[in-house]
Image (tube, grey):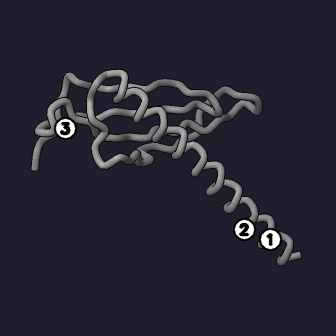
């Protein structure tokens, strides 16, 4: 019986990791697309998971909310923060916040 529980746990972790990787790749593509449209440069060509939480809603009454963060620049000398958020399977928002530059250093 313990072997079955361990196998189910390992399979669950593997499925979650694979599913999370799909969201990561999708967030990166959306961040690149948003930066191209805004004529800004995506810095480091990467996104990182900033927040992962459960929220009400979705098919089963609970869904996972994922927020990925990235940095971009208008001139190469300044840095701004952006986010890509998913609620369940749906894209919730892509935000390029030009109002608050990040501190250099």
Establish if 57 lies above or below 1.
Answer: above
Q: CA distance from mark 2 to mark 1?
A: 5 Å
Picture coordinates of residue 44 (x, y %)?
A: 30, 49
Residue 37's x, y, as percent? 36, 22
For the residue labelled by badge 1, is the local secondary structure a helix, a strand or a loop? helix
Q: Position of residue 24 (x, y in %)?
A: 52, 46
Quadrant of residue 80 within the rendered picture:
top left
Identify the residue shown where x is 73% and y is 59%: 12
**Nearer to me, 67 or 40:** 40
Disc marking residue 20:
none
Q: Nearer the viewer, mark 3 or mark 1?
A: 3
User: Looking at the image, which residue sits at the far right?
Assistant: 1
| Label 3 environment density (alpha carbons within 10 Å; few <14, some 14–19, many ≥20) | many
Label 1: few (<14), some or many (≥20) within 10 Å?
Answer: few
Sequence order check: which comes first, mark 3 or mark 1?
Answer: 1
Label 3: which secondary element: loop
Q: Position of residue 8 (x, y in %)?
A: 80, 65
> Element at badge 2?
helix
Query: Does residue 52 appear to the left or right of 70 in the view shown?
Result: right
Crowding near pointer 2: few (<14 within 10 Å), some, many (20+)? few
Q: Is residue 7 above or below residue 40?
A: below
- Residue at 31% across, 38% down: 42
Question: Mark 2 = which residue?
Answer: 10
Q: CA distance from mark 2 to mark 3?
A: 40 Å
Which residue shows up at 39% across the image and 33% down it? 83
Q: Quadrant of residue 76?
A: top left
18 lies left or right of 43: right
Q: Is residue 22 left or right of residue 8?
A: left
Residue 59 is drawn in which quadrant? top right
Q: Nearer the viewer, mark 2 or mark 3?
A: 3
């Amino acid at each position: 019986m313990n072997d079955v529980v361990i196998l189910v746990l390992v399979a669950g972790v593997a499925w979650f990791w694979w599913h999370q990787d799909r969201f990561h790749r999708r967030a990166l593509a959306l961040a690149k697309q948003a930066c191209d449209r805004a004529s800004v440069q995506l810095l480091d060509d990467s996104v990182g998971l900033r927040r992962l939480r459960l929220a009400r809603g979705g098919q089963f009454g609970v869904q996972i909310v994922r927020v990925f963060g990235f940095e971009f620049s208008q001139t190469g000398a300044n840095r701004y923060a952006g986010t890509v958020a998913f609620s369940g399977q749906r894209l919730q928002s892509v935000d390029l916040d030009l109002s608050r530059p990040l501190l250099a250093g």
